[in-house]
Amino acid sequence: MDRVKGKVAVVTGAASGIGEASARLLAKEGASVAVTDIDDRNGKRVAEEITKAGGVAEFWHMDVTREQEVEQTFADVFKKFGKLHILVNSAGIPGYPKPTHETTSAEWDRVININLKGTFLCVKYAVPYILKTKEGGSVVNISSMLGLIGGEDPVYHASKGGVRLMTKSDATIYARDNIRFNSVHPGYILTPLFRGFSSRHPGGPEAFFKEFEEKIPMGRLGTAEDVANGVLFLASDESSYITGSELVIDGAMSII
């Protein structure tokens, strides 16, 4: 308990999946959490449930692709809590698993704008407030194991690979300011988004999940909580000498 006590965190994409699990765990460990998402109903639900459980959380509607909205949200969060220490960039969408020459410019722009530009904008407007707090900070960018390897979804791989390298660049730029940047690379995780894909499988969800489990060396799909545990470690002072690193949470999927 209290691994991030007294810290203020902004979590994007916090209405579900990895973002939700991260927001809940950070709050449980003592952080005041700004739950942000475009899904107002579930975002408010997460914040309310954290509060009912004894934590501190408030919801802000934020579209990570809209610069003025991002700028205003971080200003409001800082005004509310008076500090900012942690940013978890979890907002993201899947890509379009088809060859590059069949991918439209609109499809490319949509994925890049949310997954990569959204991460950039949040870092851009978080850093000044972390600097103003003068207590150091940690930025955890959710990339993907697919940001480390090639595959059949070029735009998604590009967006998550971009997040990985942007993280390393920021790690070098802000190291002297004691702001750490690390990327997390989840594999196949049982999020609502991933579960949604299972309905399209001709054999149904059970067959869909079994196919993936057979590919994973550990023999199981990951959970959002598995990833959140990694996020918490990187957000906490326990990782105070870790920056510019990649934390792969994929059951060894990416190394076979």
Image: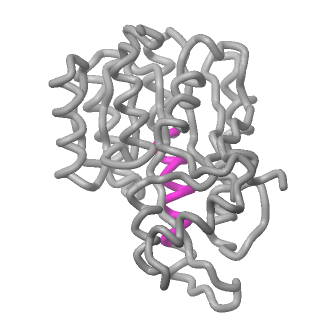
Q: How many marks?
A: 0
User: Farthest right residue?
Assistant: 256
In screen coordinates, is 82 left or right of 125? left
In screen coordinates, is 51 left or right of 24? left
User: Farthest bottom residue?
Assistant: 102
The vertical placement of 254 against 106, above or below, is above
Estimate the x, y position of residue 13 in percent, counting from the top left.
Answer: 38, 48
Q: Name the quadrant containing residue 129.
A: top left
Estimate the x, y position of residue 138 in percent, counting from the top left.
Answer: 56, 24
**Between 208 and 28, the one nearer to me in the picture:** 208
Estimate the x, y position of residue 79 in percent, counting from the top left.
Answer: 25, 23
In screen coordinates, is 170 left or right of 54? right
Task: Identify the image quadrant of the C terminus.
Answer: bottom right
The vertical placement of 8 against 93, above or below, is above
Q: Which residue is drawn at 69% across and 64% down?
A: 158
Q: Residue at x 36, y 13 (%)?
A: 30
Q: Name the quadrant containing residue 227.
A: top right
Asked which colour scheme the image uses, the reply is one colour
Asked if residue 142 lies in the magenta stretch, the reply is no
The vertical placement of 31 against 76, above or below, is above
Look at the image and give the residue range highlighted in magenta: 110-123
Asked if residue 119 lies in the magenta stretch, the reply is yes
- Magenta highlight: main SS: helix
Estimate the x, y position of residue 209 in percent, counting from the top left.
Answer: 53, 64
Q: Which residue is drawn at 72% across and 14% down?
A: 241
**Between 250 and 83, the one nearer to me in the picture:** 250
Q: Which residue is drawn at 57% across and 40% down?
A: 141
Q: Name the quadrant containing residue 57.
A: top left
Task: Identify the image quadrant of the N terminus.
Answer: top left
